[in-house]
Image (tube, coloured by chain):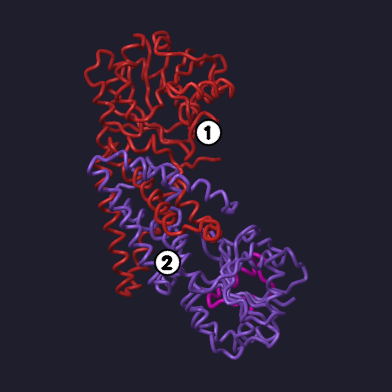
Chain colours: A purple, B red
Amino acid sequence: MNIVVIGIGLIGGSFAKDVKRLNPDAQIVGVDKNESHLDEAMELGIIDSKGDYGSLASADLVFVSIPVNALVQELPKILDAAGDETVVVDAGSTKSLICQSVEDHPKRRNYMACHPIAGTEFSGPSAAIEGLYDGKTNIICEVEKTAFKLQERALAIFQDMKMRIRYMNPEAHDKHIAYVSHLSHISSFMLGKTVIEKEKNERDIFDMAGSGFESTVRLAKSSPDMWAPIFEQNKDNVVETLDEYIQNLITFKKLIEENDFESVHQEMSNTNKIKQILKGIPLTKK
Amino acid sequence: MNIVVIGIGLIGGSFAKDVKRLNPDAQIVGVDKNESHLDEAMELGIIDSKGDYGSLASADLVFVSIPVNALVQELPKILDAAGDETVVVDAGSTKSLICQSVEDHPKRRNYMACHPIAGTEFSGPSAAIEGLYDGKTNIICEVEKTAFKLQERALAIFQDMKMRIRYMNPEAHDKHIAYVSHLSHISSFMLGKTVIEKEKNERDIFDMAGSGFESTVRLAKSSPDMWAPIFEQNKDNVVETLDEYIQNLITFKKLIEENDFESVHQEMSNTNKIKQILKGIPLTKK
């Protein structure tokens, strides 16, 4: 099996590692505009060789894990270069613009739009981990536009990795993912910003921070190169979630200001049901 | 050594477990207005016997871990009942009002104001864990008001538990803890609220949530009984942190709306330095 991974960081590197673990005979070619990432991936044994778009014609599967702004630029060229029997899957955190970018492409049937919901706040090939996708959800959009035989090939790999497959249209994906992923990142980044701004004398104050702060601010370590384009592509949905989040914060602040601590209690009590909801979320073991 | 733990939940129970582990001969008496918590703590072997304020006169150390609204009510009575050689320490997440509540108490020298910064989002005796305090910071306020011999006794226990001791005045404690703890809880509760409100059809949508959402929303599982009184007692500081947090969110949203993704990138990039800061935070191993 010939696999090409374009963008060999946390997401692509973890995919490559598991393909190799599950299919020891697979040949994995890495493509990355960052030469030092390719060198690192070679040294770490994540890929077998370096390649370029010339490697795509003979690939069985191409996994594209690059920032979503690069994805809309590159995906049409990747499909141009892909073989007739190649299936191209992506891992972009947005889906509408990406699907639009290849809507009328003559090889649209060679593309399967995916969003494997997995990751950590780290990036680069050294952040790649085995088993990252185990038990995680993979959202597939517009599956009917992918050639059936090629769907099967990609799905077999995802199933070997024990991913849970869900089907959704790109608009629904982008709307809901804004709530359960994009908003979390912004709330975390702005929490980090607020605390850093206030606490100039870092060492002393951050001695006071506990694991609660660490957990809530964890996503503020995420890569701006990855996230700025996501917010750009999903602008309308992200702004909507932010409006609602800000409004909820203003309401909560008002309850505190008005000494209505019964309602403050009630708000938190209502939200405690997140306990039950979270039980269904498969977590990354690190 | 006679130890009384008033409020035998996560915080008091974990303290009792470690006292017992480090001093097998210690006798631990539990006091709790919730009889079922006492029964549970007995069954779990966290306490040796049940007691009441009558148990305080002969105690070497009393550890008070009850919600901060109860603390300001009970602490003067606890000091009334304490022996002349008893040291009373608390674990309240606010310090100004609590210190004020016993400012002129004839046994003020028997009290040491503490905030061990440790915990999880769970509560009750069954949530108590060994080693919770290992490597954690314990903020001590107005240490000069505690009798030196009694300071020593309490500090010896904290040091056995490998806590890092920091001294601070109550006002500074309450101001800074609002940033590194109280704000995190509100940001998390309101994130949970925003997502729950939007996503009525929970099962389907929360399949899309990954470990990032789980991490950011973790504190929304926290106990409202504990947190509503904290926000009440630290109202002014909490409102100030919320004002700044909301303003930062509004600014970020505006940058997105104005398509200024260079500044969006810059904001996140500036906040990435939280990586270095977090390296210093001791985490709860669970």
Residue at the image point whose x is 21% and y is 18% from the top:
B104
Eyeballing the image, is B81 above or below A77?
Answer: above
Amino acid, disc 1: Ala
Asked if the magenta segment contains residue A143, the reply would be no
Q: In the figure, residue B33 lies in which quadrant? A: top left
The reply to whether residue B45 is in sight is yes
Under circle 1, the secondary element is helix
Q: Position of residue B182 (x, y in %)?
A: 35, 43
**Label 2, label 1: how many angstroms apart (C-alpha)?**
37 Å
- How many residues crowd mark 1 within 10 Å: few (<14), some (14–19), many (20+)? some
Q: Chain of mark 1?
A: B
Asked if the magenta segment contains residue A49, the reply would be yes
Q: Position of residue A12 (x, y in %)?
A: 60, 69
Q: Are marks 2 and 1 on the same chain?
A: no
Numbered circle sitting on residue A224: 2
Residue range corresponding to the magenta coloring: A30-51
Numbered circle sitting on residue B127: 1
Q: In the figure, residue B155 lies in which quadrant? A: top left
Under circle 2, the secondary element is helix
Residue at the image point whose x is 41% and y is 42% from the top:
A269
Position of the C terminus of chain B by quadrant: top right
Amino acid, disc 2: Pro
